Image (cartoon, rainbow, N blue to C red):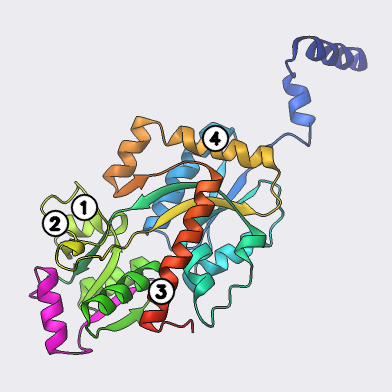
């Protein structure tokens, strides 16, 4: 009787184009049919982690399977990228792909990636950019970009700026500022943004070039003082805070987070993920949430993400060479 029922169900599916739930559950080729892991290379509480969890929640709803954020920190995200590059390309291991993973680290002297981003990672879609800014310990006297530059010129090497690691975006933004302003400041790297922020609040480091998403609550609490936005245009979340470009013409520093996977991912899965993320980024509630946290929705095609990676390689190669940055 069970055989007759199954045969009848399959005949009905063939005639109507509707696959019964029993057939869907037993079809090992259907994707997804188990939880998906989204690997994030940065600590909990940082901008990358905030975005990863927001996207994971929405993808869970869209795909009908739980998307779990897996934080694998270290080496400014490269440990996470390597773990995904060597994973099975079956759609169950995804990467929160950052500018550092595919662009700046590739052109960093002495960098040991452990993977080839062009051969082992697949860009799927660019999710969002960030509003980024310079902020300082509130006990410091600086209120403007010229205040910082003037002090640094009179006191070479005395000011310190934190970052989430050597060669990461925060380091590059600071290095570009130092180079363009013609000043000397000491770079102090940390293992991610949150521990660096803690040191700035404690007064052991002077400032950071970081993202608004992970610092906005501290700004509102008065624990840090915003000086200027490195990204253009400035965020509406902090009206009255200018851009660095207003005092240092030509300066602009941004970052982005995308979705990636191991190379070899079946095209239908890549297309589905791209479509779902773009759909999420058209939802007003989700977009309003991103903007309120300091993100700028992007979206688009996989090809557009690849072009952005190549453009950033060329751009940051110039900064890395000018600032003489090398991986350690």
Q: Which residue is mark 2?
A: 241
**Secondary structure at numbered mark 4:** helix
Contact check, label 1 and label 3, Cβ < 8 Å: no
Foreground: disc 4 or disc 3: 3
Q: Which mark is residue 11?
A: none
Q: Give the image location of residue 200, x and y in percent.
A: 24, 73
Contact check, label 3 and label 2, Cβ < 8 Å: no
Crowd band around label 4 with a 10 angstrom C-alpha radius: few (<14), some (14–19), many (20+): some
> Does 145 lie within the magenta span?
yes
**Separation of marks 3 and 2 at Cα, in angstroms:** 28 Å
Of the two numbered discs 2 and 4 on the same chain, state the one appearing first in sequence: 2
**Separation of marks 2 and 1 at Cα, in angstroms:** 7 Å
Q: As displayed, is residue 40 above or below residue 57?
A: below
**Secondary structure at numbered mark 3:** helix
Q: Give the image location of residue 10, x and y in percent.
A: 84, 16
**Secondary structure at numbered mark 2:** loop
**Separation of marks 1 and 4 at Cα, in angstroms:** 29 Å
Of the two numbered discs 1 and 3 on the same chain, state the one appearing first in sequence: 1
Of the two numbered discs 1 and 4 on the same chain, state the one appearing first in sequence: 1
**Separation of marks 2 and 4 at Cα, in angstroms:** 36 Å
Contact check, label 4 and label 3, Cβ < 8 Å: no
Q: Nearer the viewer, residue 166 or 30?
A: 166
Contact check, label 2 and label 4, Cβ < 8 Å: no
What range of the chain is rendered magenta? 139-163
**Separation of marks 1 and 3 at Cα, in angstroms:** 25 Å
Instruction: Please state if 182 lies on the left or on the right of 309 as rendered.
Output: left
Q: Nearer the viewer, residue 107 or 261?
A: 107
**Separation of marks 4 and 3 at Cα, in angstroms:** 34 Å
Q: Which residue is mark 4?
A: 275
């Amino acid at each position: 009787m069970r055989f007759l029922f199954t045969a009848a169900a399959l005949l009905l599916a063939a005639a109507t184009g509707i696959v019964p739930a029993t057939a869907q559950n037993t079809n090992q080729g259907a994707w997804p049919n188990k939880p998906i892991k989204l690997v994030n290379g940065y600590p909990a509480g940082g901008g990358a982690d905030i975005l990863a969890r927001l996207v994971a929640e929405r993808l869970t709803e869209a795909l009908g399977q739980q998307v779990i954020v897996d934080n694998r920190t270290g080496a400014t995200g490269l440990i996470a990228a390597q773990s995904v590059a060597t994973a099975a390309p079956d759609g169950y291991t995804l990467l929160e792909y950052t500018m550092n993973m595919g662009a700046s680290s590739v052109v960093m002297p002495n960098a040991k990636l452990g993977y080839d981003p062009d051969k082992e990672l697949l860009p799927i879609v660019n999710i969002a950019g960030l509003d980024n800014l310079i902020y300082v310990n509130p006990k410091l006297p600086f209120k403007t970009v010229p205040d910082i530059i003037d002090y640094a010129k009179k006191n070479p090497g005395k000011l310190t700026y934190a970052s989430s690691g050597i060669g990461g975006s925060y380091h590059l933004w600071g290095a570009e500022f130092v180079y363009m302003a013609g000043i000397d400041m000491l770079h102090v790297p940390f293992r991610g943004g949150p521990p660096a922020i803690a040191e700035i609040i404690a007064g052991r480091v002077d400032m950071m070039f970081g993202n608004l998403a992970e610092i906005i609550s501290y700004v509102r609490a008065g624990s840090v003082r915003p000086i200027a936005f490195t990204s253009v245009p400035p965020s509406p979340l902090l009206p009255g805070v200018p851009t660095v470009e207003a005092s240092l013409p030509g300066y602009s520093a941004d970052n982005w987070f995308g979705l990636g996977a191991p190379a070899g991912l079946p095209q239908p899965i890549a297309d589905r993920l791209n479509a779902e993320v773009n759909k999420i980024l058209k939802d007003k509630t989700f977009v309003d949430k991103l903007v309120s946290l300091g993100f700028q929705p992007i979206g688009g095609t996989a090809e557009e993400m690849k072009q952005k990676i190549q453009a950033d390689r060329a751009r940051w190669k110039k900064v890395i060479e000018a600032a003489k940055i090398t991986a350690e």
